[in-house]
Amino acid sequence: MDEREAIIKGNETCNFYSENLAETAAYVEDYYSNKLKVVKADEMPFENSPHGILKHMIHEKMNTVENCVDIYMQFIPGGQASGKHRHLAEEVFFVAEGEGYDLHWDVNFSVDIKFTWEWEEEPKKFEWKRGDFVYIPPYVAHKHFNSNPDNPARIISIHNRVLKAMGAAWYEQLEPYEGYVEGEDPIALLEKYGMRG
């Protein structure tokens, strides 16, 4: 049996392509008519997460026109640190306030029949201050530290969400920030640490 005889077998039919055209048209209409093009500061939700106190600026669940990245501001109280996590997408963050440093545990991987991932035992240290951008490579375990015990730090983190649509988000929280209590009110925490009054 040649290739043509093999491929013309079967009786299943579908409308996948036509449905895609209709779905695209509906998406474009919704995109231009209903999605937010401006997100006001008071519309950005706060979250007390295992990684830290966050204010989501852009997120896929916020119905904005942005389709490729998620952006949040992280608040790190004086002398404290974020949780430790890793994710397959690379990350960049901008230091809006304060000074501190990051610890990055680089990843080594090999591919044979399956992926093998191993992280360095000793982290690399990267110091940062207001106005700096910091790059975090894909799947590198990392943790942010505020080195000033008297003043807060704020960083704006940007994550690529395209990998999530491809089924490869792979967010892993390796340890929560010190003192994390699930369900604790993030606004009350900001007030407690003098970052909102």
Image: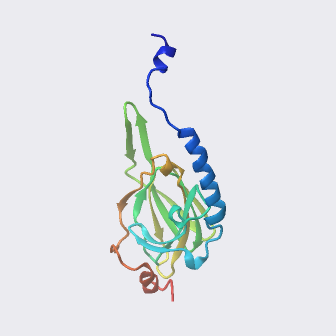
Residue 35 percent coordinates (x, y): 61, 65
Rendered residue at 57%/44% (across/down): 20
Quarter placement of the N terminus: top left
Q: For the view shown, which residue lies furthest in the top direction?
A: 1
Q: Say how the picture is coloured.
A: rainbow
Q: Is residue 77 left or right of residue 93?
A: left
Q: For the view shown, which residue lies furthest in the bottom direction?
A: 197
Rendered residue at 42%/74% (across/down): 80
Residue 113 in which image quadrant:
top left
Rendered residue at 45%/20% (across/down): 9
Rendered residue at 48%/14% (across/down): 5
Q: Nearer the viewer, residue 189 or 13?
A: 13
Q: How many numbered marks are there?
A: 0
Is 6 placed above or below 184 here?
above
Residue 139 percent coordinates (x, y): 45, 50
Residue 130 in which image quadrant:
bottom right
Residue 146 percent coordinates (x, y): 48, 72
Q: Nearer the viewer, residue 25 or 62?
A: 25
Q: Is residue 134 left or right of residue 125?
A: right
Residue 155 percent coordinates (x, y): 55, 69
Q: Is residue 123 left or right of residue 154?
A: left
Is 166 placed above or below 113 here?
below
Q: Nearer the viewer, residue 79 or 2?
A: 2
Residue 48 in which image quadrant:
bottom left
